[in-house]
C-alpha cells in the first residue's frame, strides 16, 4: 500500500448478486483500524 496521503481507491466490479457490497463491507472492516 502507498504511504502517501492519497485516498485508498479500490475498483470492484461484477454482476448483480455477486457480493460486491459484502466484499466492500469486509474490506472496510478489515482495514479501518490500520488506515484512518
Image (spheres, rainbow, N blue to C red):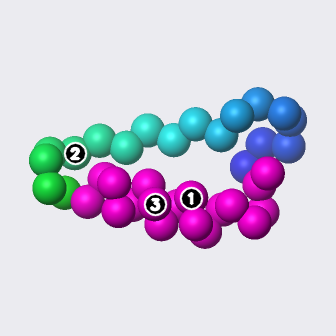
Q: Are marks 3 and 2 in contact (CB under 8 Å)?
A: no
Assign a secondary structure to mark 3: helix
Which residue ends up furthest to the left in the rendered image?
16
For residue 9, what is the image quadrant?
A: top right
Query: Which residue is rendered at x = 66% and y = 62% of the image?
Result: 31
Q: Position of residue 28 (x, y in %)?
A: 56, 58
Q: Which residue is mark 2?
A: 14
Marks 3 and 2, how far apart in space? 16 Å
Q: Position of residue 22 (x, y in %)?
A: 35, 62
- Name the mark on residue 28: 1
Which residue ends up furthest to the right in the rendered image?
4
Q: Which residue is mark 3?
A: 25
Which stretch did the figure color magenta?
19-36
Assign a secondary structure to mark 1: helix
Q: Considering only vertical position in the picture, is 11 above or below 34?
A: above
Marks 1 and 3, how far apart in space? 5 Å
Query: Which residue is rendered at x = 52% and y = 61% of the image?
Result: 27
Magenta stretch: includes residue 33: yes
Q: How many marks can you see?
A: 3
For residue 30, what is the image quadrant?
A: bottom right
Assign a secondary structure to mark 2: loop
Query: Which residue is rendered at x = 84% and y = 33% of the image?
Result: 5
Q: Are marks 1 and 3 in contact (CB under 8 Å)?
A: yes
Please name whichever residue, 28 or 5, is drawn nearer the observer in this view of the structure.
Answer: 28
Q: Considering only vertical position in the picture, is 13 above or below 26?
A: above
Q: Position of residue 29 (x, y in %)?
A: 58, 66
Q: Considering only vertical position in the picture, is 35 above or below 13?
A: below
Of the two numbered discs 3 and 2 on the same chain, state the one appearing first in sequence: 2
Q: Quick one: label 3, few (<14), some, or many (20+) residues within 10 Å?
A: few
Provide the major secondary structure of the magenta segment: helix
Amino acid at each position: 500500500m502507498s504511504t502517501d496521503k492519497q485516498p485508498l481507491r479500490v475498483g470492484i466490479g461484477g454482476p448483480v448478486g455477486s457480493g460486491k457490497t459484502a466484499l466492500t463491507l469486509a474490506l472496510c472492516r478489515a482495514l479501518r483500524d490500520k488506515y484512518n
